[in-house]
């Protein structure tokens, strides 16, 4: 692989000091991004710890992406499955696995390409303008965004949302590691409020739902919110909810696929088990409270099934655990996670206009996370001050 | 009353090349160098000139702020060179050694029957004070300090660290005499902190006049800072002393015999060392007497001290003042292809505190780690990482950030008086973003010492 390494070095030469394009030397950061993707640099430690852990941000991020692959693949399949299912039992029976997967592949792949293309393009531009190396944060965001939008979203809309999220959600705060709000959710929230007709209702969740009147693709939560009657009119079984054969955003429907991802994240120790566990406890607690009153269809909806539908599982596993925007202290993580779960279900049930409570709950708690940490750390400080005054007194 | 401390958070890094408990013979070094840079926040003022004859234990330089604190020569001979760096900073004082060491004459003394002031004077006069460190800051103790207590850690949990039991075996009398001397320096207790499995030698177990505390758990359980935190955490304005076990014996021997005997056992280890074992040598000796002919490959890093906190030295360099080990590991100054040994590989040869490489499936594997940073420096993204290897009731990442922004009040509130940079060595090791945590903490401590005294 030496020739490849030399090729990168040669590519950078004209931009280095004394080279032909010296004044464009910030381009080096762009080339560096590709070089460091292929080769961990020859950088060595100087002082302090002479040896370092094998992990780096590239490894961390690539594991998160790996954990999302089951959701992505299942989402592709489910896109086709929902399409044929909405066309009727005969259509569903006639469609092969490949027919279904193909629809998803053709629809989802462009979403992924646009998300990465636009987002990374902006990241590269900012890094080169500011003269720093390109950080890996967007690699995960770029995969998250296609998974949390409806299948038929126009690509230009996605591009606008990604650009908004990366510039105003992240770069203005200083880039990777500095943002307050989860970038992927910022993109989704932007879409939700800027183009509500493309982001909610009962037409958008199934491929061709907006153009083909025969297709109705309301989500379970949408159904429940609109429902006059009880739970018996639900069109999906709990098993279908768990496996994910229900309408919804591209990658969020399958609790099974999300659980595989969660397994990878927890096994490797990349994501916080505290946040995941406490969010499930919080969601369960709120669900149980509603079940107790059971005043309408949404309140009657069994608490454990709340976790199978909508974006709850996906949000808790992949977005609440984003370390940059979550609480940073271990105690804070418990509180942060619990409130996310609690509020997600509360928003869902109380405000049927926003069936996707998890998005708003996480964004709200992103804003609250520094406050939670502040009080946790303040507790530690108080303990220290008390100890010191007791002794000198 | 003895305390039992169980450390849960931490990390033992299993490295190849641990020193066998065998004593090798090293050839005697011709020249010795004492490096003022081994002392933190210490402005040296020379007491000798080039060409001057010195005895073992005669002072070479003193601390500008505390002129009583002098650092002695490890051997007798002739000062041949004072090396200086930028702004004429003194980097080292080189002494060409006599064949037979002659010692600065002091009468043998029994510390147990001396007063505190006499012991202090003796320690200062015989250049022994430099072995005593203080917390906060981890700098050399000030003669004006009134320590609440004195702490001695009798084990080192750092990777490839020397084994105190082996090093001090049979030195019962010297060690006890050292403890007796330290006891006179404080109205409080002398704490001797032992590890149930690592410390079984009588030299520690039978120590008198001290409080023995039992500590267990992974690295950094052996760090004296961690032990202090769990025994009696330090508050603002309080001072304690710490002395390394080996140096306690050195002090004791100087009291018993009147001689400043800077000879010591050094563990020579690391994956590049052919036969890792212990050598009897003298402080400041030439590194080449320990590693020449004993090292594999020609692209290695030689570290005086352990791999987490030691100092990089050249092949023609010298052992540091406090170093108990010399470690040699391969340099990692080559690019690593991402699929084979980079970030996307299976990583069977990579050690990680996370389970992100498959090497975690082999818990008993020993690693041959090089000095590559294994990734580029990034903004702090991952949280909870420092906390998992930092066994104190302190928020390490918050403290590090407080230091980065230079907020002194916040640093104080978050517990900077309780830490030294070595306590953050593991944080630096595990950091995904490759932050130079120890450097940050070092600068923070220097700032606090300058501003708050």
Image (cartoon, grey):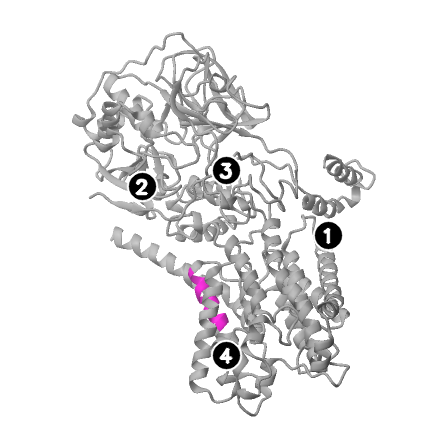
At 67% from the left and 48% from the top, the residue drawn is: A132
The residue identified by callout 4 is A346
Q: Which callout, 2 or 3, points to the residue nearer the camera?
A: 3
Is label 2 in a helix, a strand or a loop?
A: loop
Q: Residue B193, how many percent across, how many down?
A: 29, 38
Instruction: Point out which mark residue B382 bears.
Output: none
Disc 2: CA contacts within 10 A as few (<14), some (14-19) or many (>=20):
some
Which of the chains bears the disc numbered 4? A
Are tags 2 and 4 found on a single chain? no
Furthest residue toward left: B113
Is label 4 in a helix, a strand or a loop?
A: helix
- Whichever of callouts 1 and 4 sits on the residue coming sooner in the sequence is 1
Q: In the shown orientation, is residue A103 left or right of residue B246?
A: right
The residue identified by callout 1 is A129
Q: Residue B444, how many percent across, how many down?
A: 47, 44
Magenta stretch?
A331-341
Whether A242 is drawn above or below B171: the answer is below
The residue identified by callout 2 is B239
Q: In the shown orientation, is residue B350 left or right of residue A195?
A: left
């Amino acid at each position: 692989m030496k020739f490849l390494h030399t090729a990168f070095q040669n590519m950078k030469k004209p931009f280095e000091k004394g080279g032909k394009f010296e004044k464009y030397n910030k381009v080096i950061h762009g080339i560096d991004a590709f070089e460091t993707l292929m080769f961990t640099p020859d950088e060595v430690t100087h002082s302090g710890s002479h040896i370092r852990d094998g992990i780096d941000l590239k490894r961390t991020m690539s594991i998160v992406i790996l954990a999302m692959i089951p959701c992505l693949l299942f989402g592709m399949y489910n896109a086709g499955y929902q399409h044929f299912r909405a066309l009727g039992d005969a259509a569903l029976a006639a469609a092969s696995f490949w027919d279904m997967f193909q629809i998803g592949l053709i629809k989802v792949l462009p979403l992924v390409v646009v998300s990465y293309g636009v987002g990374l393009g902006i990241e590269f531009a900012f890094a080169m303008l500011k003269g720093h190396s390109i950080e890996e944060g967007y690699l995960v965001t770029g995969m998250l965004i296609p998974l949390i939008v409806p299948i038929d979203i126009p690509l230009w809309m996605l591009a606008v949302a990604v650009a908004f999220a990366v510039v105003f959600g992240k770069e203005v705060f200083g880039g990777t590691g500095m943002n307050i709000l989860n970038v992927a959710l910022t993109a989704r929230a932007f879409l939700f409020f800027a183009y509500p007709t493309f982001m909610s209702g009962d037409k958008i969740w199934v491929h061709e739902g907006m153009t083909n009147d025969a297709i109705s693709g309301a989500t379970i939560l949408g159904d429940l919110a609109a429902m006059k009657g009880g739970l018996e009119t639900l069109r999906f079984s709990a098993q279908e909810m768990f496996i994910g054969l229900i309408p919804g955003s591209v990658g969020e429907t399958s609790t099974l696929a999300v659980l595989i991802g969660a397994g990878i994240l927890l096994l490797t120790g990349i994501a916080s088990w505290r946040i995941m566990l406490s969010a499930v406890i919080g969601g369960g607690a709120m669900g149980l409270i509603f079940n107790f009153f059971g005043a309408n269809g949404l309140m009657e909806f069994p608490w454990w099934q709340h976790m199978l539908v909508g974006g709850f599982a996906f949000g808790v596993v992949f977005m609440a655990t984003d370390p940059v925007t979550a609480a940073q202290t271990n105690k804070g993580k418990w509180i942060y996670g619990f409130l996310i779960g609690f509020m997600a279900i509360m928003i869902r049930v109380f405000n049927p206009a926003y069936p996707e409570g998890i998005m708003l709950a996480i964004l709200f708690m992103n804003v609250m996370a520094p406050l939670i940490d502040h009080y946790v750390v303040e507790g530690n400080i108080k303990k220290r001050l008390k100890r010191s005054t007791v002794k000198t007194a | 009353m003895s305390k039992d401390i169980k450390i849960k958070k931490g990390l033992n890094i299993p490295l190849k090349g641990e020193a066998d408990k065998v004593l090798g013979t090293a050839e005697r070094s011709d020249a010795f160098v004492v490096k003022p840079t081994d002392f933190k926040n210490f402005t040296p003022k020379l007491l000798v000139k080039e060409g001057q004859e010195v005895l073992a234990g005669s002072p070479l330089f003193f601390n500008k702020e505390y002129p009583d604190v002098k650092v002695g020569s490890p051997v007798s001979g002739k000062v041949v060179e004072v090396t200086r760096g930028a702004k004429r900073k003194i980097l080292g004082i080189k002494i060409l050694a006599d064949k037979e060491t002659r010692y600065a004459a002091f009468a043998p003394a029994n510390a147990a029957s001396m007063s505190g002031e006499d012991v202090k004077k003796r320690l200062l006069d015989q250049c022994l004070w430099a072995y005593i460190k203080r917390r906060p800051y981890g700098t050399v103790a000030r003669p004006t300090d009134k320590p609440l207590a004195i702490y001695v850690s009798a084990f080192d949990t750092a990777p490839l660290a020397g084994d105190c039991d082996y090093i001090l075996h049979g030195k019962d009398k010297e060690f006890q005499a050292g403890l007796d001397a330290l006891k006179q320096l404080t109205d409080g207790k002398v704490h001797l902190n032992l590890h149930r499995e690592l410390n079984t030698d009588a030299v520690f177990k039978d120590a008198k006049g001290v409080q023995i505390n039992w500590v267990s758990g992974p690295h950094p359980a052996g760090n004296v800072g961690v032990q202090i935190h769990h025994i009696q955490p330090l508050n603002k304005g309080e001072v304690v002393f710490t002395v390394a076990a080996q140096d306690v014996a050195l002090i004791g021997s100087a009291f018993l015999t009147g001689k400043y005997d800077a000879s010591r056992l050094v563990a020579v280890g690391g994956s590049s060392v052919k036969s890792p074992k212990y050598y009897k040598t003298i402080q400041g000796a030439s590194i080449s007497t320990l590693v020449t002919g004993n090292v594999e490959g020609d692209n290695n890093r030689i570290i005086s001290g352990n791999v987490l906190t030691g100092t990089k030295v050249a092949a023609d360099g010298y052992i540091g003042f406090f170093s108990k080990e010399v470690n040699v590991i391969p340099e990692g100054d080559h690019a690593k292809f991402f699929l084979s040994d980079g970030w996307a590989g299976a990583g069977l040869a990579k050690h990680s505190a996370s389970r992100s490489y498959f090497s975690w499936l082999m818990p008993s594997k020993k690693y041959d780690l090089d000095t590559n940073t294994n990734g580029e420096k990034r903004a702090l993204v991952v949280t909870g990482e420092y906390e998992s290897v930092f066994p104190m009731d302190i928020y390490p990442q918050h403290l590090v950030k407080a230091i980065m922004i230079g907020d002194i009040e916040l640093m104080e509130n978050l517990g900077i008086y309780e830490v030294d940079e070595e306590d953050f060595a593991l944080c630096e090791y595990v950091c995904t973003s490759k932050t130079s945590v120890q450097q940050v903490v070092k600068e923070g401590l220097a700032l606090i010492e300058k501003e708050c005294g």
